[in-house]
């Protein structure tokens, strides 16, 4: 049984040419200008163990909004609380290099995600994008469109992607297809862009 709604590694292999075109078009800033191509650049500006204004800018490049009251709590009034939680999350490792429990329900990453969702008008999508800005190699992005397209088990996206990419042969098959992106862009982000563009064509929206 596939971990997602379809066999992820098989999907990348089968759609390799389209994925390469999609990644090239997204990151090259050609005829279609995707502001999300700046996400990784903005996210890399700040301290990885502190939420900073550059993280808000990174997330908003992905066409979502961090409302001022939520940003103020994150960056000014409750910064110590959020940064303390952030420091508990592995920093340098790729998703497939950490323990499964590091990205499962009840992990420090999950705890911080829930805390972010508790901010004014911050839903699970924006919270996840904020976390991806701070841990781009560890925590993959999920939005409504990709969720409907990929169909991960509810509440278990990170750990399911961990299981998928922990298989070296499957990870290498996906990575081989996803080479058409700048070197600094993580494999998780490449996967996200490929799935998001496919979901847009598929019309999977909420």
Image: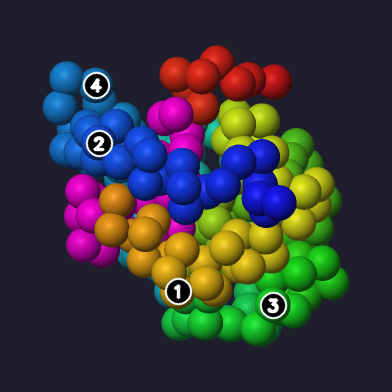
Of residues 200 and 118, the one nearer the viewer is: 200
Residue 4 position, x and y percent, is 66, 47
In the image, which is nearer the foreground, mark 4 or mark 2? 2
Q: Is residue 16 magenta?
A: no
3D distance between C-alphas at marks 4 and 1: 34 Å
Local packing at callout 3 (Cα closer than 10 Å; few below 14, some 14-19, many 20+) is some
In the image, which is nearer the foreground, mark 1 or mark 3? 1
Residue at left offset 80%, top offset 47%: 154
First-in-chain label (1 vs 2): 2
Whether label 3 touches label 2, CB < 8 Å: no
Magenta residues span: 178-198
User: Which disc is residue 57 wearing?
Assistant: none
**Element carrying mark 3:** helix
| Image quarter hosting the C terminus | top right
Q: Which residue is mark 3?
A: 100
3D distance between C-alphas at marks 1 and 3: 15 Å
Residue at left offset 52%, top offset 48%: 8
First-in-chain label (3 vs 2): 2
3D distance between C-alphas at marks 3 and 4: 38 Å
Whether label 4 touches label 1, CB < 8 Å: no
First-in-chain label (1 vs 3): 3
**Element carrying mark 4:** loop
Instruction: Indicate the quadrant where residue 194 lies.
Output: top left
User: Which disc is residue 32 wearing?
Assistant: 4
Snapshot colouring? rainbow
């Amino acid at each position: 049984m596939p971990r997602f709604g379809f066999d992820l590694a098989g999907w990348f292999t089968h759609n390799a040419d389209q994925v390469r075109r999609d990644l090239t078009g997204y990151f090259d800033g050609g005829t279609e200008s995707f502001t999300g191509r700046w996400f990784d650049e903005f996210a890399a500006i700040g301290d990885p163990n502190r939420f900073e204004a550059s993280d808000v800018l990174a997330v908003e490049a992905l066409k979502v909004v961090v409302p001022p009251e939520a940003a103020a709590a994150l960056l000014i009034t409750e910064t110590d609380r959020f940064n303390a939680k952030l420091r508990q999350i592995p920093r340098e490792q790729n998703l497939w290099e950490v323990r499964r429990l590091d990205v499962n329900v009840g992990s420090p990453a999950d705890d911080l995600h829930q805390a972010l969702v508790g901010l004014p008008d911050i839903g699970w999508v924006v919270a996840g994008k904020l976390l991806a800005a701070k841990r781009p190699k560890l925590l993959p992005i999920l939005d409504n469109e990709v969720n409907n397209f990929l169909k991960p088990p509810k509440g278990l996206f990170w750990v399911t992607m961990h299981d998928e990419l922990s298989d070296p042969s499957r990870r290498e098959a996906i990575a081989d297809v996803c080479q058409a992106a700048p070197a600094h862009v993580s494999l998780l982000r490449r996967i996200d862009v490929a799935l998001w563009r496919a979901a847009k064509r598929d019309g999977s929206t909420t």
